[in-house]
Amino acid sequence: MKKLKHSKFKNTGILFELLVRQITADILDDKQDSHANRLMRKYFAEDASLGKEQRLYQLLMEESAYDSGNAERLIDAVAKSHKKLNTKKLAQQRYELVKEMKGAYPIDDFLRSKIRNYKTYASIFKLFESENEDIYCDAKELYESKNTILQGLCSKKAQTNESTEDYEQHNEDLRLITYKLLVDKFNEKYSSTLSEDQQRLLKNYINNISNTNSLREYIDTQIPNVKSRISELSDKVVDDEVVKIKLGEVISQLDSISDGRVVKDSQVSTLLMSYELIKELEKHENN
């Protein structure tokens, strides 16, 4: 009898989240035909076994309960529904999905990235796998997994009052909506297409939804380069009052971008604006 052990390759919830991230990255890269999107439609369709299992993961990840009694009843109901799924079909579809993902993307890099609410995903996996009679699950480990899920369900109500700037707890859908609004507002203000630097920044912003340290490190490495480039170009436009005003605004904000551990939308916007100013300066230079 095999001992229960968590595996990202077998965790349907994690595989689904990784595909969502890749689809977003493909959109940012302006890929018209996203392989990740095809995989999503193929394996997570409403009538697909993985699609049904993913919705059970989603219930335990996103629902809220007023008290532990309601949370326990929800856990039991979801576990009962999961027992009705065909385990052989689930295993086969997961195997085929991972195989296709390996063929199209560096899946090892995928799995090394930080997963939002990893502990809860692992706990749900263990809850579902404990149903398998061929797998030994330690009673204490199963208890701890259920307790993790229960605490998450009971804490959801409190989390709805969180600060909108606390990205470690943000729901991924809200982050993607925030991203869309950010780009729409930027394009409306400047009426221009995004440069490679701007696209790269936004790609990092989305790809590091759960890894605030990585996003912070990326932005901190960009600030010296931006300031240096602006400094080089600014000497050539000293007679342009409009550009000089924008230049002063951006430079005054660049130093504050590094403040705080969590990256705010306003800081991303400032860096976007800095790249836009560089485009204006370069255009002025070429003219």
Image (cartoon, helix red, strand yellow):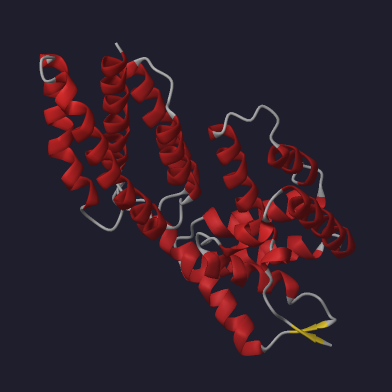
Can residue 204 be seen in this snapshot?
A: yes
Q: Who's the residue at 54% across and 66% down the image?
A: 118
Location of the N terminus by quadrant is: bottom right
Is residue 259 left or right of 208 when viewed as pictured?
Answer: left
Q: Position of residue 255 (x, y in %)?
A: 17, 46
Q: Position of residue 169 (x, y in %)?
A: 40, 56
Q: Hey, which residue is sitting farthest top in the picture?
A: 287
Is residue 281 left or right of 168 when viewed as pictured?
Answer: left
Q: Name the one closer to the observer, 167 or 138.
A: 167
- Taking 150 as reference, is 173 above or below it? above
Can residue 174 be seen in this snapshot?
A: no
- Taking 48 as reference, is 211 above or below it? below
Location of the C terminus by quadrant is: top left
- Taking 116 as reference, is 150 above or below it? below
Q: Name the one closer to the observer, 115 or 272.
A: 272
Is residue 263 left or right of 19 when viewed as pictured?
Answer: left
Q: Position of residue 230 (x, y in %)?
A: 22, 33
- Taking 147 as reference, is 202 above or below it? above
Q: Quadrant of residue 125?
A: bottom right
Q: Position of residue 149 (x, y in %)?
A: 54, 69
Q: Who's the residue at 40% across and 23% down the image?
A: 184
Q: Quadrant of residue 192?
A: top left
Q: Quadrant of residue 236?
A: top left
Q: Who's the residue at 65% across and 88% down the image?
A: 139
How many marks overall?
0
Q: Name the one closer to the observer, 137 or 192.
A: 192
Q: Who's the residue at 32% across and 18% down the image?
A: 190
